[in-house]
Image (cartoon, coloured by chain):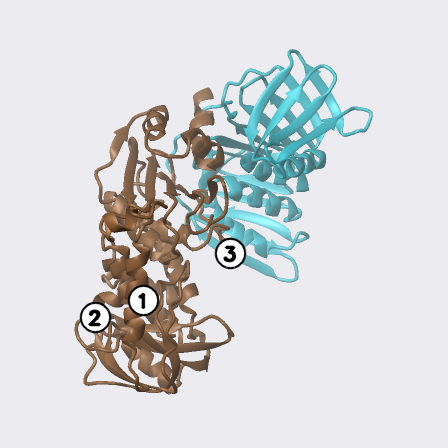
């Protein structure tokens, strides 16, 4: 027996896989005794996702091997995850047969078996990104701001200074500006060493922000015209980080 | 317009700036209309040709078509053979065809007329048919952005096929295989070399798919259904191919149209954009060019694009090229339509032009900026405007890749 993971409810994983499938085609989860990780590029290589869930976040976590690679096609996995009910108990299992068992335990025990994809063992390096602004915001507020911005444009400007964090969009269709302040409660932390202004594609941000369904707070880190690091803490432990290349003006 | 222009031109040089000579076309139309037989009986060689209307769905008008004479009419309803033919000639083929029509429920595929049309759809060569019409065909022509131009039509009493029809073996095979799903049937036919317009005809007369699901499909819808299905099939393979190594740019100018393809060394994504100049078909009264388009990412799309069926026609032709070179790429297809091109003639025009476009030798570049500098001299719209309107061009020009930071 190689690997067995049990999560108390399927909800987190349903949303997690849904978000990942928007950005990634195929990728491998890597399970080690200390936890589960996944790092992958989107096909156009503009964005990278980096997932980390420690063993403690699972109800049960058994990994008897040094490393188990779970290569999957995310469209396929998403179809399976859609079948799970949010309250079902959720299990992932890789046995000797090199197949992935996805199991939901609710009114019945439902098992889906997927062949594992061999995606090579190449490891992606961690992006080294300079940061001058560190912002913590309610994730729903960011999701809303991105939806607001989409009315006029397909990209947004993030502006951070010592006092405030602003998401802006403009085009010949008009302008949108969303101000986050500590008084109104949406802005939780603001640490700006140097004012930062950068533009990012809404296409990607919108997909990434779907994570707000399972995570209340998002950390945004960046510097002027540098990539964005967007981190969501996952319920029960672990985090999902997105790296997004900036849009040049 | 200067009055002497027509005199100097006489239909040969198109001095008026139109994509066709209106005087000649009017003349042809009159001539064809006058050729309509006095009797209610039309005897002629069907290319083969058939039409399924969409108005009244799920009860639609269907019927066979043929010019009122016999001979090799195969080109009359075969858009794949129309490219590089003058528009006047294409319109002449089309106006010649007389269509008989009867209302039928779309699920009524055991209907006698439907069975005849199914046989007709599978014919490899023109078939002599006799149509008995209720009255003389109405002398008029129909132009549509999806469907090729159509000639006169009249209510049909009965139709009979003359002699033995030689049917295409592959088509016959999928026709009788009532467990074969539509998608699989379409890909089987396509891979065995049956042309897109033939597959479309068989689909529209309910000749493919699992039995319970067979039904009549309006010609207009079936054209896009086939373009979309086949390109979806090709895309499954193209997504697995290695990336292109450089930027390839293709340019084609044809009949008041400019077609440009930019293939970039990135994973599959695709964009189709059209710029209609004032006094072209879909911008008759505007004062400046209008750009519209739609795109998809690596995973394709599930919603119908705003821009319409030409999106899929062009996607099909693009993927055919990528299949040939066994590479994947980000493909950006641009079309400029200049004043004077003011007839809607069907999406075949886009499909066949993009196919021609990719037969040319491409320009090769190593940097998107070189592509930009080159196309600045090609497009009539400022290329900066194209970049502003195009999501994928902007992505190529303005977005860094995250790996740069690793």
Residue occupying image coordinates x 67% and y 42%: A213
* Marker disc for residue B73: 2
**Chain identifier of the brown chain:** B
Labels 1, 2: one chain:
yes
3D distance between C-alphas at marks 1 and 2: 18 Å
* Marker disc for residue B181: none
Chain A on-screen colour: cyan
Residue occupying image coordinates x 33% and y 42%: B259
Where residue B86 sits: x, y (%)?
A: 24, 55
The chain letter for the residue carrying disc 2 is B
Question: Looking at the image, is mark 1 or mark 2 earlier in the sequence?
Answer: 1
Q: Nearer the viewer, mark 1 or mark 3?
A: 1
Q: Nearer the viewer, mark 1 or mark 2?
A: 1
The chain letter for the residue carrying disc 3 is A
3D distance between C-alphas at marks 3 and 2: 56 Å
Where residue A40 sits: x, y (%)?
A: 47, 34
* Residue positioned most to the front: B3
Q: Inspect this view and state whether residue A142 appears.
A: yes
B132 vs B311, nearest the viewer: B132
> For this view, does A106 lie left or right of residue B207?
right
* Residue positioned most to the top: A193
Residue at the spot of label 3: A112
* Marker disc for residue B29: 1
The chain letter for the residue carrying disc 1 is B
Q: Residues within 10 Å of mark 2 (few under 14, many from 20)?
A: many
User: Is A178 situated above or below B305?
Assistant: above
Residue occupying image coordinates x 66% and y 52%: A86
Q: Residues within 10 Å of mark 1 (few under 14, many from 20)?
A: many
3D distance between C-alphas at marks 1 and 3: 63 Å
Residue occupying image coordinates x 25% and y 67%: B76
């Amino acid at each position: 027996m190689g690997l067995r993971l049990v999560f108390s409810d399927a909800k987190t994983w349903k949303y997690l896989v849904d978000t990942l499938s928007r950005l990634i085609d195929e990728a491998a989860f890597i399970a080690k005794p200390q936890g589960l990780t996944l790092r992958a590029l989107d096909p156009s290589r503009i964005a990278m996702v980096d997932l980390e869930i420690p063993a403690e976040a699972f109800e049960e976590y058994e990994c008897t091997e040094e490393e188990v690679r779970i290569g999957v096609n995310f469209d396929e996995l998403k179809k399976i995850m859609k079948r799970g009910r949010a309250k079902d108990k959720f299990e992932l299992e890789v046995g000797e047969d090199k197949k992935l068992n996805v199991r939901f335990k609710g009114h019945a025990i439902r098992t889906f078996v997927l062949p594992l994809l061999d995606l090579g063992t190449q490891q992606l390096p961690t992006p080294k990104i300079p940061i001058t602004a560190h912002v913590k915001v309610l994730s729903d507020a960011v999701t809303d701001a991105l939806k607001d911005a989409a009315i006029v444009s397909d990209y947004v400007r993030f502006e951070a200074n010592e006092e405030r964090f602003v998401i802006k969009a403009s085009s010949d269709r008009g302008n949108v500006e969303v101000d986050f302040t500590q008084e109104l409660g949406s802005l939780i932390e603001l640490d700006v060493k140097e004012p930062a202004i950068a533009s990012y594609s809404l296409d990607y941000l919108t997909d990434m922000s779907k994570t707000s369904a399972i995570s209340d707070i998002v950390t945004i880190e960046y510097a002027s015209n540098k990539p964005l690091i967007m981190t969501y803490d996952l319920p029960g432990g672990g985090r999902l980080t997105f790296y997004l290349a900036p849009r040049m003006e | 317009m200067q009055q002497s222009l027509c005199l100097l031109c006489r239909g040969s040089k198109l001095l008026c700036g139109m994509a066709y000579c209106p005087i000649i076309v009017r003349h042809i139309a009159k001539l064809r209309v006058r050729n309509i037989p006095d009797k209610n009986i039309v005897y002629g060689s069907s290319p083969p040709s058939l039409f399924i209307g969409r108005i009244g769905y799920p009860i639609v008008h269907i019927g066979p078509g043929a010019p009122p004479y016999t001979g090799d009419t195969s080109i009359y309803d075969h858009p794949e053979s129309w490219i590089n033919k003058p528009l006047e000639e294409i319109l002449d083929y089309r106006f010649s065809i007389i269509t008989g029509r009867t209302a039928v429920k779309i699920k009524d595929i055991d209907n006698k007329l439907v069975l005849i049309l199914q046989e007709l759809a599978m014919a490899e060569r023109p078939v002599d048919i006799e149509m008995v019409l209720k009255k003389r065909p109405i002398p008029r022509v129909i132009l549509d952005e999806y469907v090729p131009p159509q000639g006169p039509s009249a209510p049909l009493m009965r139709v009979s096929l003359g002699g033995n029809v030689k049917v295409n073996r592959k088509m016959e095979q999928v026709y009788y295989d009532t467990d074969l799903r539509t998608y699989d049937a379409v890909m089987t036919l396509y891979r065995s070399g049956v042309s897109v317009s033939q597959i479309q005809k068989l689909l529209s007369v309910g000749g493919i798919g699992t039995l319970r699901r067979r039904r009549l499909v309006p010609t207009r819808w079936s054209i896009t259904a086939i373009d979309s299905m086949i390109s979806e099939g090709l895309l499954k393979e193209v997504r697995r191919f290695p990336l292109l190594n450089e930027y390839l740019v293709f340019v084609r100018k044809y009949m008041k149209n400019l077609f440009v393809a930019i293939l970039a060394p990135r994973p599959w994504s695709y964009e189709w954009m059209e710029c209609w100049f004032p006094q072209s078909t879909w911008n008759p009264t505007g004062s400046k060019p209008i750009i519209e388009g739609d795109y998809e990412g690596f995973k394709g799309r599930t919603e119908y694009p705003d821009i319409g069926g030409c999106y899929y026609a062009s996607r099909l032709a693009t993927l055919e090229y990528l299949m040939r070179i066994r590479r994947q790429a980000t493909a950006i297809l641009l079309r400029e339509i200049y004043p004077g091109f003011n007839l809607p003639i069907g999406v075949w025009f886009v499909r066949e032009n993009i196919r021609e476009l990719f037969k040319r030798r491409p320009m090769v570049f190593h940097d998107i900026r070189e592509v930009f500098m080159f196309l600045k001299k090609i497009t009539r719209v400022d290329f900066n405007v194209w970049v502003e309107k195009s999501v994928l061009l902007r992505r190529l020009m303005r977005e860094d890749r995250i790996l740069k930071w690793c």
